[in-house]
Amino acid sequence: MLFDLRSRGRRRTVQAVYLGLALLMGGGLVLFGVGAGNGFGGILNAFTGGGSNNSKPVISQSEKAAIQATQLRPNDPNAWAQLVQARDAAAKQEFNPSTGAFTAAGKSELVSETQAWQRYLQLTKSPDPTTAILAARAYGLLGQYANEASAWEYVTLAAPTEAKGYECLAVSAYAANQTRKGDLAAAKALTLVPKVQRTLLKQQLQQAKTQPAIAQTC
């Protein structure tokens, strides 16, 4: 079979192909384009990698290049944004659809992704919203909901007329027990969607108050 990963060389080839596709897709990401309908975009829909049982990820050429860029230009926010994107793509290669979970290597990549995001924030006053979305989702998948909410706040600042950012800010704030922040974001989101969608969205936001895992689906 074409995607038989039992061969070590073939496995690395397939990983490289998927990583290249992930980076190309990330570069052309339309803000809030993930997901469909009135609900929250399903992050797992984007995870098509086969995963592995390794505890340490195999560093791709793209990630190596991004790391080298941060070493050569440690104060360049663009270099750190590229590292966030490269580590996000690498993490997705370590998602196992059979178990519905990340491998230990994938979780390690998510942690490294959020560390790169924190360094990026130190270097820029206007975070790129696409990079912020990647960081927010990484935090959500790690169960760090307060940090997830903070990342979604940057998204809403960059796109104040888009409901999606406020929806995800609301559910992540609820998951972090930041009820006041969640209520404000939920109210804003409801004003930005068509009237026919408001009842359903309101129900979903109410569910998020008692179901923190919903924050992982943005």
Image (cartoon, rainbow, N blue to C red):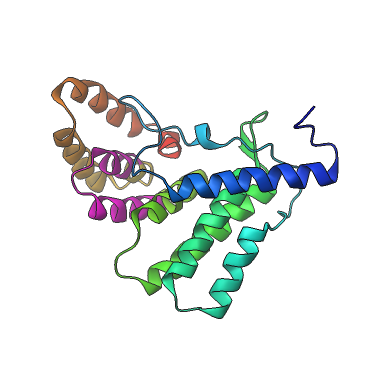
Q: Residue at x 42, y 47 (%)?
A: 28
Does residue 144 appear anywhere in the picture? Answer: no
Q: Residue at x 45, y 53 (%)?
A: 135
Q: Quadrant of residue 190?
A: top left
Total count of labels = 0
Pick the front one: 64 or 160? 64
Q: Quadrant of residue 95?
A: top right
Instruction: Give how far across and how far down residue 33 sits, in percent.
Output: 36, 37
Pick the front one: 101 or 177? 101
Instruction: Give how far across and how far down residue 192 sits, in percent.
Output: 17, 36
Instruction: Give how far across and how far down residue 61 sits, in percent.
Output: 67, 60
Figure quadrant of the N terminus: top right
Does residue 218 appear anywhere in the picture? Answer: yes
Q: Residue at x 29, y 39 (%)?
A: 164
- Magenta region, main secondary structure: helix
Instruction: Give how far across and how far down residue 29 sits, in percent.
Output: 41, 45
Q: Which residues are magenta?
A: 147-171
Q: Is residue 163 above or below residue 197?
A: below
